[in-house]
Image: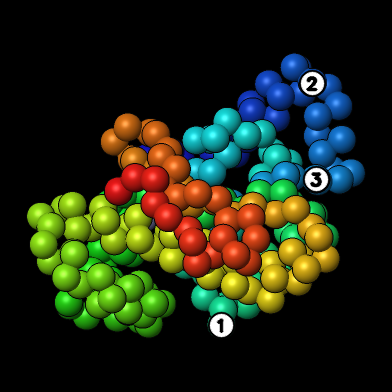
């Protein structure tokens, strides 16, 4: 394990390397941010938004929580969404889950995990809704499937917020995307067509899975 001193040394080395390539990089970045993308992903340390999409600081606004949940009662995600849409005017919202998600696995299992069970209640409802299909699958595949269903479910939640509905009514161009990341390959798969209008929400259909 690296010491905290090493992390701080890494930071200085990184800042020096970036400045050597582009002397004004940090000065320009400090004056404004204008990312085109909002990323809603899992807190899992193995799914860092910038790194896996090759985006630099300033290029993606990020919200992460356990199992990439978008709950209409969560002020945290709503505040991020509103700022991204109304102020930053992002063009794309990417909901990106990942296979083997611990949060989704906890929702799939019928055992108590503590407070987190409340956070995951929406995914447990989703599991009950798709119980027949999930039970017909091998347990590992059932987990993968619920991870996919969860991404599309949360993408629909984004589309149904008043923030997005109002933005679309104003004529703002916003697309919502359902992506999933495979940890053991480092690759992202597109799960469904993007949602570009209220009419797309119901007709969202899966490309794979
Ligand atoms: Zn996860």
User: Which mark sits nearer the N-terminus, 2 or 3?
Assistant: 2
Using the image, determine if residue 125 lies above or below residue 158: below
Q: Residue 73 shows which numbered tag? A: 1
Disc 2 is placed on an element classified as loop
The front one of 31 and 170 is: 170
Which callout, 1 or 2, points to the residue nearer the camera? 1
Q: Residue 117, position in %: x, y?
A: 32, 79
Res 200 visible: yes
Q: Residue 103, position in %: x, y?
A: 33, 64
Seen at 33% across and 73% down, the residue is 126
Q: Residue 34 shows which numbered tag? A: 3
User: Which mark sits nearer the N-terminus, 1 or 2?
Assistant: 2
Seen at 70% across and 71% down, the residue is 165
Q: Residue 96, position in %: x, y?
A: 47, 51
Question: Around disc 3, counting alpha carbons within 10 Å, would you say few (fewer than 14), some (14 to 19), or many (20 or more)?
Answer: some
| Furthest residue toward top | 21
Location of mark 2 (residue): 22
- Residue 129 falls left or right of residue 96: left
Quarter of the render that holds ligand 1: bottom left
- Residue 175 falls left or right of residue 172: left
Q: Residue 170 shows which numbered tag? A: none
Q: Give the spatial CA distance, label 3 vs label 1.
A: 27 Å
The front one of 23 and 169 is: 169
């Amino acid at each position: 394990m690296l010491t905290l001193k090493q992390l701080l040394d890494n930071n200085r080395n990184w800042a020096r390397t970036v400045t050597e390539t582009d002397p004004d990089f940090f000065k320009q970045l400090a004056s404004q941010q204008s990312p085109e993308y909002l990323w809603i992903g899992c807190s899992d340390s193995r799914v860092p938004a910038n790194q896996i999409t090759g985006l630099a600081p300033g290029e993606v606004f990020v919200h992460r929580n356990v199992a990439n949940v978008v709950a209409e009662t969560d002020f945290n995600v709503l505040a991020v969404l509103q700022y991204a849409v109304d102020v930053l005017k992002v063009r794309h919202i990417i909901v990106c889950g990942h296979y083997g998600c611990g949060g989704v696995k906890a929702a799939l299992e019928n055992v108590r995990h503590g407070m987190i069970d409340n956070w995951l209640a929406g995914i447990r409802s989703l599991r009950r809704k798709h119980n027949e299909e999930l039970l017909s699958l091998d347990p590992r595949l059932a987990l993968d499937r619920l991870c996919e269903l969860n991404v599309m479910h949360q993408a629909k939640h984004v589309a149904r917020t008043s923030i997005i509905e109002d933005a679309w009514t104003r004529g703002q161009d916003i697309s919502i995307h359902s992506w999933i990341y495979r940890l053991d390959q480092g690759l992202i798969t597109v799960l469904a067509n993007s949602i570009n209008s209220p009419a797309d929400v119901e007709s969202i259909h899966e490309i794979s899975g």
